[in-house]
Image (cartoon, rainbow, N blue to C red):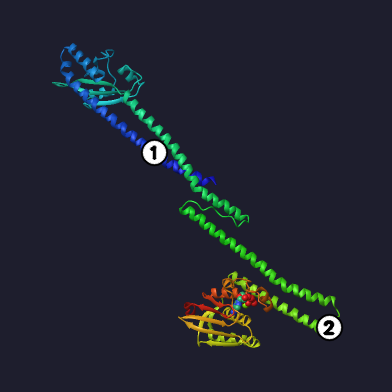
Amino acid sequence: MASIRWKILLAFFLIVGLSFFVAATSLNGMVKDYLFEQRKRDDIAKTGKLAQKAAPLFQSVSSNELNDLLEEEAETMDGRLILIDNDGKIQYDTFQNLCGQRTQVDEVIRVLRGETVKDYGIHTPGKSVVEAMSGESAEYVAYSTYEMNGYKGRIGAAMFVSKIQSLVDSIERVEMQLLRVFAVIAVAALAFALLLSRLLTNPITAVSRTMRKMGKGDLSVRVPVRGSGELRELAENYNTMASQLESLDKTRNQFVSNASHELKTPLATMKILLESMIYEPDMPAEVRADFMKDMNHEIDRLTGIVTDLLVLTRMDNGEEMKRGIVNMTELTHETIHQLTPAAEKNNQTLTGDVQEDLFFYGDKSKLSQILYNLMDNAIKYTPEEGKISVSLREEDGNIVWRVKDNGIGIPEEDLDHIFERFYRVDKARGRETGGTGLGLSIVKQMVRMHGGTITVESSLGKGSEFTVTFPQEGAES
Ligand SMILES: Nc1ncnc2c1ncn2[C@@H]1O[C@H](COP(=O)(O)OP(=O)(O)OP(=O)(O)O)[C@@H](O)[C@H]1O
Ligand SMILES: [Mg+2]
């Protein structure tokens, strides 16, 4: 769980930290370069001027005058001034203590060798040269050298030892300041990253917690939908999925309990009949025969229910369709013929209006079951002397079946439910007429498997009309 949070945290911190580090170091470098460059230019220029002024006096013998000049310049330039002759021997030193010594300083040697006319170098404290030259060992110094020219070329070099400690100090101060800012930014970034990662991971954690609960069997739990964007969508989608699972689970449970109930009723009836036959051995033969007939009827009923359940579960499990070109005209005539006796028994008139030569690419036995179930209902739910009409037509290229009756009709509030499994408008009447409430749910599923639709119009006491429409494409392919 912590993993994604830490990754976000680390990534954020690295990005902020690194970019600040890069920005700070390059800024610092730029400031440093700029300040040092400027100082270097200044120092060299000053040294150049000094060399120019000192050269004529250096050649003459008037050492006092030169001493005065050096003293004066050393004061204005704020540093130590040293003049070296062509042999590398120190002739003048405003600090006095190096006069007469040979110099080992690189900046001077390079000028005296003629490699350059001017040179510059920065020296860290603690180095022996610095100690020797500056007299203040603990400080940063810079050496600027410039050649001194007489009439016949170079006569020596002038050297300016300038204190750059304050420059180094101020750069260090800038660095310290940057470090402090960095620390503040780092803490802020850390806090922000912590907040952000929590914001990002909390919804995910919530989903995963809910999933765990669902996994344990509680399908009623939902994820709180908060925030916006993808995470909100995740929560919403998850909840939709959970609702669907829950309703699926409910439907399944209900289906099983309904099925058991429907199977129990005929079994209970049979048990009563059988027990009376067992405990009343002297039962009259006609009564016994009646009982047997009743039991036979219950067995038929049981078989019917089990057959319907099998059909439904097979379709639920994605049973293959046995498609072929079906002569719908013929199929309709056959089904009407098949159900005519049942209608005649009720003195009902059954009429057919069947268009010639209509074909449809589908599963013949399923198509025939669709029409059979609809007509069976129409006959069952229409009183004696009623009228039932069946039509098959091509409308806008679609194949359309209409089964109409002038029977008892269906109450408005039940219309939405009649296609549900085990749904019967009148439970008591249903059992009497042998209905289980599975017929229309089978019809609906079979129609859907053919890509078709089924609609119903009905008014209570006046009759009902079921319309099945199969789409054009199905008819052509
Ligand atoms: N033509 C109709 N006229 C009036 N009511 C109907 C009609 N067709 C269906 N119904 C109502 O819809 C309910 C569901 O019909 P369905 O065919 O699914 O079940 P059933 O006929 O009761 O049982 P079976 O599973 O044997 O078909 C019926 O019980 C009945 O109340
Ligand atoms: Mg039915």
Q: Residue at x 23, y 19 (%)?
A: 76
- Label 1 beta carbon less than 8 Å to ligand 1: no
Between the residue at mark 1 and the residue at mark 2, the CA separation in whole angstroms equals 106 Å
Horizontal side of 366 relative to 281 (left or right) equals left
Residue placed at 69% from the left, 69% from the top?
A: 260
Instruction: Look at the numbered disc 2 and say if its residue's Cβ is closer than 8 Å to ligand 1.
Output: no
- Left of 431 or right of it: where is 371? left
Q: Nearer the viewer, mark 1 or mark 2?
A: 2
Vertical relation: 336 (above or below) 443: below
Crowd around label 2: few <14 · some 14–19 · many ≥20 (10 Å):
few
Establish if 29 lies above or below 367.
above
Q: In front: 30, or 326?
A: 326
65 or 436: nearer the viewer:
436
Which amino acid type is marked by label 1? Phe
From this viewpoint, which residue is outermost toward the right? 282
Tag 1 secondary structure: helix
* Front residue (pair 57, 191): 191
- In the image, is 73 to the left or to the right of 317? left
1 or 2: tag closer to the N-terminus: 1
Q: Label 2: state its secondary structure.
A: loop
Q: What label sits on residue 284 in the rendered view? A: 2
Q: Is residue 83 visible?
A: no
Q: Position of residue 151 (x, y in %)?
A: 13, 21
In the picture, the disc for residue 63 is none
Q: Position of residue 80 (x, y in %)?
A: 26, 18
Residue kind at label 2, given as amino acid type: Pro
Among the 4 quarters of the image, the one containing residue 143: top left
Mark 1 = which residue? 20
* In this view, 42 is above or below 334: above
> Quarter of the picture for ligand 2?
bottom right
Could one spot residue 173 in this view of the protein? Answer: yes
